[in-house]
């Protein structure tokens, strides 16, 4: 008998709505705690999710869509994502490239910048032994040292903080989710900074010199936490316009798109897939490759 299990890593979960939006069994519920009842010592007030084990049938869709890698499904103790194994749901594309040739030994800017502790910088000596920071600083011939940078891509939403903080331009990070966010500061309550405190990416939301909330979209991952905790409806308008994923082979993803992205973007993606399928059919019939030039 197979034993399935769903685990939620609360240290990674930021309380975004992605998993609760697309769970086909409504087994995941999102809760937004009331501001008046939230104790200050508890830290930033963020939403949280709860999983109903009786409703969950361990399909793995939540596992697939979590951009923070907070949800894992397993079978008999081994990681498994059934909807990906059956190719009914795509894997998210996560991309972080590091040119370690540009990394000076001792620099840990990218490691310190990552808000989720996903980056690890190691410096190896000529003998392959990892050196401590003190050893690196005192090493006479730094050109002999080798820098290695490891990134835990499973939990990386592509916020680009590591890229923007790198003084050598050695890192390139790509967002998993693209979108737009607008804040109507005329609707913001006086002195409110709920969205600033809840945002999991430092510096993405901040108070300008006029005391009003500003957005740095370079680092926004469009998780929606800010909108969820905002006390005023429509003060924050967030739309997801594109989600990077592997090729889709099933209609299950199309249903997910309806809930995750804007109607305009969904129409564009479905139209592109329809065109691709049409081209593939023609190519098979004619036996030659169609060439399409982008406008």
Image (spheres, grey):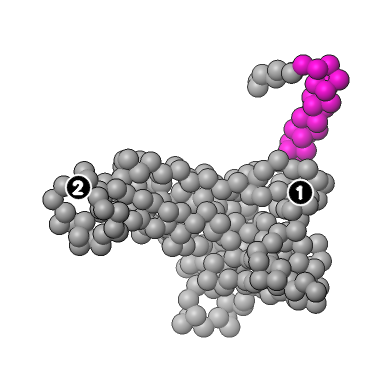
CA neighbours of label 2 inside 10 A, class few (<14), some (14 to 19), many (20+) = some
Is 122 magenta? The answer is no
- Establish if 68 lies above or below 253: below
Query: Of label 2 and label 1, which has the lower sequence position?
Result: 1
Residue 130 in sight: yes
Is 270 magenta? The answer is yes
- Establish if 190 lies above or below 142: below
- Establish if 101 lies above or below 109: above
Q: Nearer the viewer, residue 138 or 176?
A: 138
Q: Nearer the viewer, residue 165 or 196?
A: 165
Give the alpha-carbon distance from disc 2 to disc 1, as whole Å.
48 Å
Q: Which mark is residue 9?
A: none
Residue span colored magenta: 266-288
Residue 193 in sight: no
- Establish if 21 lies above or below 6: above
Q: Residue at x 16, y 47 (%)?
A: 141
Q: Is residue 217 left or right of residue 262?
A: left
Query: Where, quadrant-wise, is the C terminus in this rendering?
Result: top right
Q: Position of residue 235 (x, y in %)?
A: 61, 58
Q: Position of residue 15 (x, y in %)?
A: 60, 67
Q: Secondary structure at mark 1?
A: loop
Q: Position of residue 21 (x, y in %)?
A: 73, 61
Q: Is residue 101 left or right of residue 74?
A: left
Q: Which residue is mark 1?
A: 87
Q: Residue at x 77, y 62 (%)?
A: 59
Q: Secondary structure at mark 2?
A: helix
Q: Residue at x 34, y 47 (%)?
A: 166
Q: Which mark is residue 142?
A: 2
Q: Is residue 286 left or right of residue 226?
A: right
Query: Where, quadrant-wise, is the N terminus in this rendering?
Result: bottom right
């Amino acid at each position: 008998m197979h034993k399935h299990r769903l685990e939620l890593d609360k240290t990674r979960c930021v309380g975004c709505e992605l998993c609760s939006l697309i769970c086909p069994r409504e087994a995941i519920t999102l809760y937004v705690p009331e501001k008046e009842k939230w104790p200050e010592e508890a830290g930033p007030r963020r939403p949280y999710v709860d999983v109903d084990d009786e409703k969950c049938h361990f399909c793995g869709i939540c596992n697939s869509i979590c951009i923070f890698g907070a949800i894992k499904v397993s079978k008999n103790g081994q990681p498994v994502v059934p909807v990906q194994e059956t190719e009914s749901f795509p894997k998210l594309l996560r991309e972080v490239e590091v040119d370690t040739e540009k990394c000076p030994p001792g620099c840990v800017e990218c490691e310190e910048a990552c808000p989720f502790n996903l980056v690890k910088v190691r410096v190896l000596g000529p003998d392959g032994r990892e050196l401590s920071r003190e050893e690196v600083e005192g090493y006479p011939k730094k050109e002999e040292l080798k820098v290695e940078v490891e990134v835990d891509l499973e939990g990386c939403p592509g916020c680009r903080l590591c890229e923007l903080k790198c003084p050598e331009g050695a890192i390139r990070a790509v967002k998993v989710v693209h979108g737009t966010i607008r804040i109507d500061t005329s609707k913001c309550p006086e002195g409110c900074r709920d969205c600033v405190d809840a945002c999991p990416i430092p510096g993405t939301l901040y108070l300008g010199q006029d005391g009003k909330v500003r957005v740095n979209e370079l680092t926004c991952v469009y998780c929606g936490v800010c909108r969820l905790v905002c006390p005023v409806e429509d003060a924050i308008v967030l739309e997801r316009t594109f989600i990077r994923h592997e090729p889709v082979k099933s209609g299950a993803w199309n249903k997910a798109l309806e809930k995750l992205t804007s109607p305009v973007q969904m129409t564009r993606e479905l139209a592109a897939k329809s065109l691709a399928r049409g081209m593939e059919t023609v190519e098979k019939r004619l036996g030659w490759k169609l060439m399409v030039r982008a406008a």
